[in-house]
Amino acid sequence: MHTRGKQPDVPAPDTPWDEIAPGLWMGGHQFRARTGRLEFASVRQEFDLVQTLLRLPGHGPDPGVEHHVWPIPDGPLDGTQLLGVIRLAEAACEALDDGRKVLVRCYHGYNRSGLVVAHALMRRGSSAEEAIRLIRARRSGWALHNDLFVDYLRAGLPTARLLEELTE
């Protein structure tokens, strides 16, 4: 399994966030600026809904912006954590249906945010493979490099959740 913790050579993205589908953005807390230096991204009022899977204080959003926080590891998830991912994807889809702009973010904006965004895309009719390809094309080739998360998507998150709960 590939995760950020086991691959310290994973490069930071070149942008703080990228639009994956109309209104649906994926990003992180750290990116490599044009100067080549690592910088931290702070979201203010650019989005109507921000979903945070790794919370770092001082990185926004501004007061008044709807903010959902669901910290999860970049590794195996239990049934409760998977249910939270499913609910975040549902909330993202509802916001998109209302014409709202959504950002899903984690540390680099590769794995945890990719899991939520891919599930949202699948809820809107994409296959797992289509969602993964789109995310990698629009965000980074490093997106969803966590093989376990790709397996969760291919199995379907509700199925993965049931299987995880059986083993708990």
Image (cartoon, grey):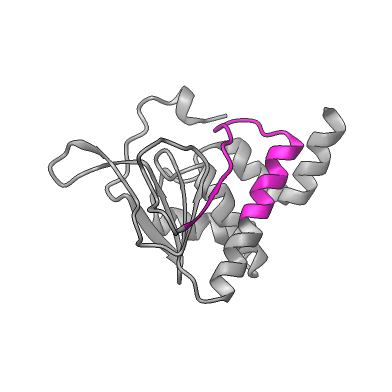
In the rendered image, the vertical position of residue 107 relative to residue 125, given as above or below: above
Give the residue drawn at x 52%, y 49%. 114
Give the residue drawn at x 72%, y 49%. 157
Q: Residue 107 at x, y = what percent?
A: 42, 38
Identity of the residue furthest to the right in this view: 166
The part of the image, by quadrant, that contains residue 18 is bottom left
Identity of the residue furthest to the left in this view: 35
Quadrant, the C terminus: top right
Q: Nearer the viewer, residue 150 or 16?
A: 16
In the rendered image, the vertical position of residue 138 relative to residue 37, given as above or below: below
Identity of the residue furthest to the front in this view: 63
Q: Nearer the viewer, residue 70 or 32?
A: 70
Which residues are the magenta region?
66-88
Q: Residue 128 at x, y = what percent?
A: 63, 57
**Lateral position of residue 107 relative to residue 146, left or right:** left
In the rendered image, the vertical position of residue 49 relative to residue 71, given as above or below: below
Give the residue drawn at x 58%, y 51%. 116
**Lateral position of residue 87 relative to residue 70, left or right:** right
